[in-house]
Amino acid sequence: MKKPDFAELVDRSSIIVCCGSGGVGKTTTAAALGIEAARRGRRVVVITIDPARRLADALGLAGGLDNDPKRIESNGEGELWAMMLDATRTFDEVVREHSRSSQQATRILDNPFYKNVASRLSGSQEYMAAEKLFALDRDDRFDLVIVDTPPSREALDFLRAPRKLTSFLDHRVYRWLMAPARGGLRVLNIAAQPILRTIGRVIGADVLADAIDFFQAFEGIEDGFRNRAVAVEGLLRSDRTRYVVVASPRADTVEEARFFVGELDKLGIPVSGLVVNRLQPRFGRGTSAATLRESKAADEAGERTRALLLRNLAEMRKVAEAEDKTIAPLMASAKSATVARLYLRPDDVHDLSTIAELGRDLLVGQQ
Amino acid sequence: MFDTDRLLVVAGKGGVGKTTVTAALAVAAADMGRRVVVVTIDGRPGLARLLGASEEAGSTYEGDVVAEGRGPGRRGSIHLRTISAAEALQDYLGTQGLARLAKRLVSTGVVDVVASAAPGIDDLLVLGKVKHLVGLAGDDGPHDLVIVDGPAAGHALSLLRSPDAMAETIRGGPLRSQAIEIRNMMRDPAKCRVVLVTLPETTPVNELVETSDVLTDEIGVTLGPVVVNGVDHADDVEELVTAGGLPEDELGAAARFRASRVAVHRREVARIDEIVPGGHLELPYLTTGAIDHKAVRRLAMSIAEQIGARS
């Protein structure tokens, strides 16, 4: 079977998830794919869930981005939009949507424990990103959603967050905490329960009281949450969603990328694209060792300038050889993926036109 | 640097070479006669190897001594330890007289609920173990200096923020006093400094600015020198390019590319000095291939020279 290439990826996918560790140019890659998709006629929205302003910077938006998609000028028939996830606001919206009454929503939203969960519970940000993705996927304004995820181990939470939340709701301790409310007993006597006393001693009785109040307020809307979580997870695992792993030629980012490829594989999800970014450009052919010998010969012949130029080329080839060695295991592990190699530029990429160029390189740089 | 420090937390976004810098700082400090404890959190691979030990060395809290310093008197050493969040939580429950319960709490999943009821509790308990090690540091103690290889990316900030967040969330009890003690330690410049690592490139430096603001203004820690990793000083190549008249072949193209990166690096290092007071240390760009223990030793020598030149 022919591997799908990046052109096909941006032409045919409904959702593209970009994963990889920090500093590999993941945000730039997401933006570049977005620009290229819009140029090819798609109506695309790029979401970042990175708290840094990277996507806004990358797209040259001085005013920044927020939780609502903003239109960005682009070439071609399509449209380019971008937004930055506000996890807390999205969580609030989800609670309001699922609540049976505004009183119930207020009781949850005002609870100190909820505020903690919404902003700090590990995975809540990823879950809200998945939730937003689900909403944007259904939004008629867009036919392609591109997500720039946080660094890869957290990006896995992104896949698992819906399940994590449902398993939390199904957790027997949670069920047990809920039991008194179900039984019509509205007040739970913390002091009467040894295990609650124990937890209370560790985290403080008032925090525990807030937590119990939150769980009780949550009663009746868990089903809505649970059904949505199942739908979101289904979408993330369907073939409408494609995964692009981004790495740079450094041992640590390659390690992370391989870890991610492996985890996706365990979930039965193939990696569609692999982008190796920030490679040093290659100049001509030849090994570093041979070039260094030439440099020494030139030096002995008194050709100082030529010797220095050759030494420089030898050093750059040495770096290139080390890069190839570093990325080799990743290339081998992502066999299903179409691969694009992107090279460092003379100056750093940070405006819209250079990112657009990068997008074109992505489509032709594949091998 | 190193003489009076008790705790250095090395932090930086992924891909900037934070672990390499941690290893190089540890080797430099050990060579200067310090007995160093290097702490990794939830054991990311690679650090042991960079310190010249086998991959599995130092993978427990007890850890292993992985290197002796080469400096005068050979007093210095490196002890590598790993702290895991799950262990820290179990230990804490143990110290609260809940040792027997701790196992059951973990196996029944109550711990998950505790951790979600008080998010950040695991971060706080990890820092609690670090604080314990810092408390032991000193001439009469088993070590002089603790270096923490901080977690990657945004998690470093939430780790360092956890004492503050917990002190706010929890209004009483032993965890609250623990949180306040840790916060006091972190805010004491005589005890703790944060070493930020960056690359001399536009985006990493932009992020460095944001991170340093959050660390100093919100979290209230003191910054040590910023470590700029991979600074290319191929000035001779740059001079050739500036002089002009280079061939239009691969030799000329390679030189022009290198010179443009050298210029970017110079510009970004200058920007760091402008924005972050307290100066910087530079690690040279290595053209010798992948980073191994030998490369780390070279980087450590460079750090030691720069520290010597500063004092």
Image (spheres, rainbow, N blue to C red):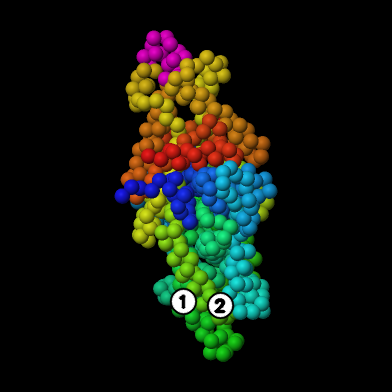
Write the residue at 39% across / 25% down. Answer: A284
Q: Secondary structure at mark 2?
A: loop
Tag 1 residue: A170
**Could you tell me which chain the residue with mark 2 belongs to?**
A
Q: Is residue B163 above or below residue A203?
A: above
Q: Is residue A324 left or right of residue A12?
A: left
Residue A199 painted magenta: no
Whole-angstrom CA distance, mark 1 to mark 2, is 13 Å
Write the residue at 38% across / 11% down. Answer: A300
Task: Find residue A221 and name its label.
Answer: 2
Q: Is residue A8 left or right of residue B207?
A: left
Specify the amino acid type for callout 1.
Asp
Q: Secondary structure at mark 1?
A: helix
**Could you tell me which chain the residue with mark 1 belongs to?**
A
Specify the amino acid type for callout 2.
Ile
Name the image quarter holding the C terminus of chain A.
top left
Magenta range is: A296-310
Q: Is residue B279 above or below residue A83?
A: above
Residue furthest to the front in view is A77
Find residue B247 and report its horizontal and vertical position in percent: 47, 16
